[in-house]
Image (cartoon, rainbow, N blue to C red):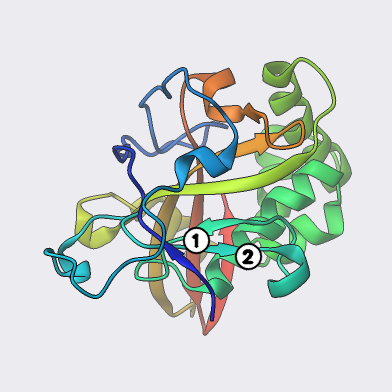
Amino acid sequence: MKALFRKAAALLAAGALTFSMFSCSSSSSDDHDHDHEGNLAGGELNGDENVELDQMPYGAQLMKLTKAEDGVAIGGEVDTRYLSVEEYSKLADYLYAINTKDATLLSNTMFPGMADYMVSRLGSGTTDNYVASLYDNIKSYTGGDFEFNYIQTLDCQTAGSGMDFSSYDSLITTLAPDAQITSRKCVSCDIMYDNGKSSLSYRTGQNFDIILYTVNGNCYAFR
């Protein structure tokens, strides 16, 4: 059975929705030790916890996922009360596609037609150029080539939590008028690189947010 951990740090709230690279959240990260193990505290949850888990916020119960054991593209931690392993895996695929500049994987991870829409909207010319531009945007913060090593999922917002997903709904229904949207989520992440010692949130001053939609029974990740 996978180990579950209690998150000790305060959770960061997400803010306004835009299409910018660092979009949904506006909170700055604290200057702290960026080794991801330092953010897992308290060990396994005991049966005598005073507060019911369903009353606790995102991050109160975390599961660690690894490439070796779980087959995810990038290892990390997820609160499975809010995000399924499948949803985390799609999120990891999206980040891995950017990290490796894999245009095919990026297109397959996003909702059908969305990558082409973004290429047209941004004037990138090709999907290869588009994913390269996403990589270069992050590189401007890291100061050089990078390799994502670990994903800390910090928060998950839904329409029920007050976030406005209408712009994404409009885009999806424009691409596929008969689309049946059954889930909308915005996941705030900190992404570790340089063997897990450097934090992208620390470099940028805000979290990296990814949109997860379930449409016609399939999960997609995009920004």
Residue at the left extreme, as displayed? 50
Q: Secondary structure at mark 1?
A: strand
Report x, y in % for residue 60. Answer: 31, 57
- Report crowding for label 2: few under 14, some 14 to 19, many 20 or more residues within 10 A (C-alpha): many
Gap in angstroms between the C-alphas marked 2 and 1: 8 Å
Which residue type does callout 2 highlight? Lys
Quadrant in the picture for residue 37: top right
Going by the image, does 156 lie left or right of 161?
right
Toward the viewer: 104 or 33?
33
Left/right placement of residue 64 relative to residue 44 reads: right
Is 97 or 116 nearer to us in this picture?
97
Q: Which mark is residue 212?
A: 1
Residue hosting label 2: 90
Q: Which mark is residue 197?
A: none
Which residue appears at 52% of the width and 83% of the height? 216
Which is more toward the observer, 164 or 47? 47
Horizontal and vertical percent position of residue 180: 44, 80
Q: Is residue 75 above or below residue 204?
A: below
Q: Residue at x 20, y 70 (%)?
A: 54
Of labels 2 and 1, earlier in sequence is 2
Q: Quadrant of residue 158?
A: bottom left
Amino acid type at circle 1 is Leu
Indicate the position of residue 1 as horizontal and vertical percent values. 54, 81
Q: Quadrant of residue 26?
A: top left
Tell me the element at label 2: helix
Q: In this orientation, does residue 176 appear?
A: no
Residue 137 located left or right of residue 221:
right
| Front one among 51 and 139 | 51
Q: Are marks 2 and 1 in contact (CB under 8 Å)?
A: yes
